[in-house]
Amino acid sequence: MGAIRTPREKWIEEGLRALAAGGPEAVRIELLAQALGVSKGGFYGYFRNRDALLAEMLDTWEREVTEAVIEQAEDGGGDARARLARLFAIVAAASDGAVTSVTAELAVREWARRDEAVAERLRRVDNRRMDYLRSLYRSFCADEDEVEVRALLTFSSRIGTRFMAADHGGRSRQEVMLLAREWLTR
């Protein structure tokens, strides 16, 4: 019986964990193999080199934080408010995954500050997310300014709250985020 290969997705997930922990410089084949408890030889069965892994990491991240999330939000049907509620729940639940975590998101954003190709991909991801949010808010907001503000606040809350150290008048951050979601979907 042959040896069981470490699945391609595990290499990508571990690469995204390394990216989140230390940036693109931390994505090293030997270190990933050690973290996975395998030899680095298995890596080359899937990837030509480190650059190929980095590209697939970005492909996976882009797909999982845009189209996969949008598909899940749309799958349940309902009106725009129902889809927004589902979107908020999906994003909140996905915050711990190797691919969809806020730390992976922030690591990609930091990487984009130093790499124009990554910055272009990030713009595409952000534009896709904003376009989806706009489409939902337009269904119950006639004012385009209000649509843009709601979309921006919704999107910004995904990332921005991680940088805040403020107290919330006796409420938890989660409670305030729930209130914000209710307000945004009125």
Image (tube, rainbow, N blue to C red):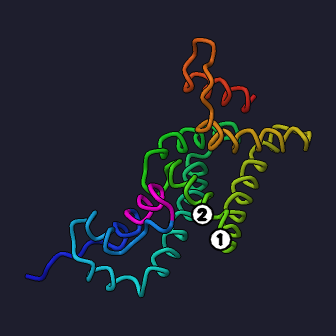
Picture coordinates of residue 15 (x, y %)? Answer: 41, 66
Picture coordinates of residue 85 (x, y %)? Answer: 61, 36
Say few, some or many: other residues with alpha carbon within 10 Å of mark 1 (under 14 / 14 to 19 / 20 or more): few
User: In this picture, which residue range is highlighted in magenta?
Assistant: 14-23
Name the mark on residue 22: none
Picture coordinates of residue 21 (x, y %)? Answer: 44, 55
Relative to the observer, which residue lies in front, 19 or 9? Answer: 19
160 with respect to 96 (left or right): right
For residue 1, above or below residue 31: below
Label 2 near label 1: C-beta < 8 Å? yes
Q: Which residue is mark 1?
A: 115
Q: Which residue is mark 2?
A: 111
For residue 164, above or below residue 72: above
Say few, some or many: other residues with alpha carbon within 10 Å of mark 2 (under 14 / 14 to 19 / 20 or more): many
Q: Quadrant of the C terminus?
A: top right
In the image, what residue occupies the spot 32% across and 68% down? Answer: 31
- Give residue 166's quadrant in the image: top right
Residue type of the residue flagged with mark 1:
Asp
Picture coordinates of residue 12 (x, y %)? Answer: 41, 68
Rounded to the nearest angstrom, the CA distance separating label 1 from label 2 is 6 Å
Q: Secondary structure at mark 2?
A: helix
Prevailing secondary structure class for the magenta stretch in the rendered image? helix
In the image, what residue occupies the spot 56% across and 51% down? Answer: 75
